[in-house]
Amino acid sequence: MKRLMLAVAVFSLAGSALAAGKPCDELKAEIDAKLKDKGVVSYSLEVVDKGSATDKTVVGSCEAGAKEIVYQRG
């Protein structure tokens, strides 16, 4: 149940993040703050080239869709 709630929270962040045309660092900081507010601990966020995230969850897109922000539990 806890994982389901986390997945819902992450994907709800992705919806708003994908529509934003913000710089990657700014968007990453916003996603990080939202995860911390929800009490999520032990995770990593990383900016990668679009399509290169294999085993991680994409939670945002930046630089006009050229880069993605990926989430991984740590």
Image (tube, grey):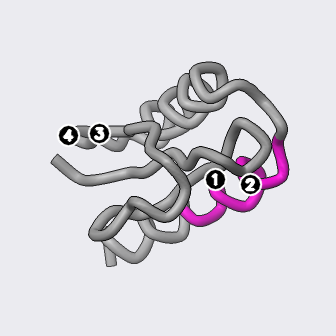
Q: Earlier in the sequence, mark 1 or mark 4?
A: 1
The residue singled out by tag 2 in the image is: 18
Q: Are marks 3 and 2 in contact (CB under 8 Å)?
A: no
Quote the CA–CA distance across marks 3 and 2.
18 Å
Percent across and percent down for residue 27 are 65, 30
- Frontmost residue, 59 versus 1: 59
At label 3, the amino acid type is Ser
Percent across and percent down for residue 2 are 31, 69
Which callout, 3 or 1, points to the residue nearer the camera?
A: 3
Q: Is residue 12 magenta?
A: yes
Q: Quadrant of residue 18?
A: bottom right
Q: Residue at x 49, y 48 (%)?
A: 49
Residue range of the region highlighted in magenta in the rendering: 11-20
At label 2, the amino acid type is Leu
Q: Quadrant of residue 31?
A: top right
- Give the total of numbered labels: 4
Q: Are marks 4 and 2 in contact (CB under 8 Å)?
A: no
- For the N terminus, the image quarter is bottom left
Quote the CA–CA distance across marks 1 and 4.
18 Å
Q: Earlier in the sequence, mark 1 or mark 2?
A: 1
Which callout, 4 or 2, points to the residue nearer the camera?
A: 2
The residue singled out by tag 4 in the image is: 42
- Dominant SS in magenta: helix
